[in-house]
Image: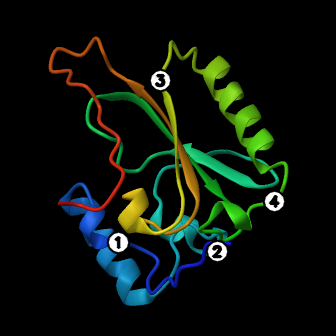
Amino acid sequence: FFYYERKKHVEIYNVRGKAQQKVMLEILKNKECPFCPKNFLKYHKERVITETKRWILTRNQWPYQHTLHHFLAVYKKHAETLQEIEHGAFKELLMLFQTVEKEFSLPGGALCLRFGGTDYSAGTVAHLHAQLIVPDINHPDYKRIRFAIGKKE
């Protein structure tokens, strides 16, 4: 069993803009996990699209540049590693994303899941979460989306 010690809930070095940085600095000051249900709406300003027993689904508050859709599924219990999630959670997540794919008529995209230490996951929040990302390939300024993993150089 892999274990690492978490010292903080967010990683400021992985933010992608000034607005996100401002919120992350507030979270660091308050020493709260922004993805735990009791804090989620305090920091996340996109509406919750739906919830299941184990997941909250919303749009990403800070979508990657050049996305048509960027959804965020947050595990409801505080978990950082795959070892901490309940059996059946991935089945539920798949059904959630299948519903989104159908409801929004998504032509394709990618699923990404962040877990564990932020030096490895490149996440800004140390709480297990998944993303469904659809590029906006028809936008005039389109550029390919790169999903980062690993520590910044």
Q: Earlier in the sequence, mark 2 or mark 3?
A: 2
x and y percent of residue 36 in the render? Answer: 61, 70
Front label number (4 vs 2): 4
Q: CA distance from mark 1 to mark 2?
A: 20 Å
Cβ atoms under marks 1 and 2 closer than 8 Å: no
Question: At 21% across and 56% down in the image, what residue appears?
Answer: 17
Q: Which residue is mark 3?
A: 109
Q: Where does residue 15 sit, x and y in percent of width and height?
A: 27, 61
Query: Earlier along the polypeptide chain: callout 4 or callout 1?
Result: 1
| Image side of residue 98 versus residue 127, left or right | right
Q: Amino acid at mark 4?
A: Glu
- Residue on which the image places disc 1: 11
Q: Which residue is mark 4?
A: 86
Tell me whether circle 4 and circle 2 mark residues in contact (CB < 8 Å). no
Disc 1 packing (10 Å; few <14; some 14–19; many ≥20):
some
For the N terminus, the image quarter is bottom right
- Quarter assignment of residue 74: bottom right
State the separation of the CA atoms marked 4 and 3: 26 Å
The answer to whether residue 100 is left or right of residue 145 is: right
Graded by Cα atoms within 10 Å as few (under 14), some (14 to 19) or many (20 or more), the crowding at tag 2 reads few
Q: Amino acid at mark 2?
A: Lys
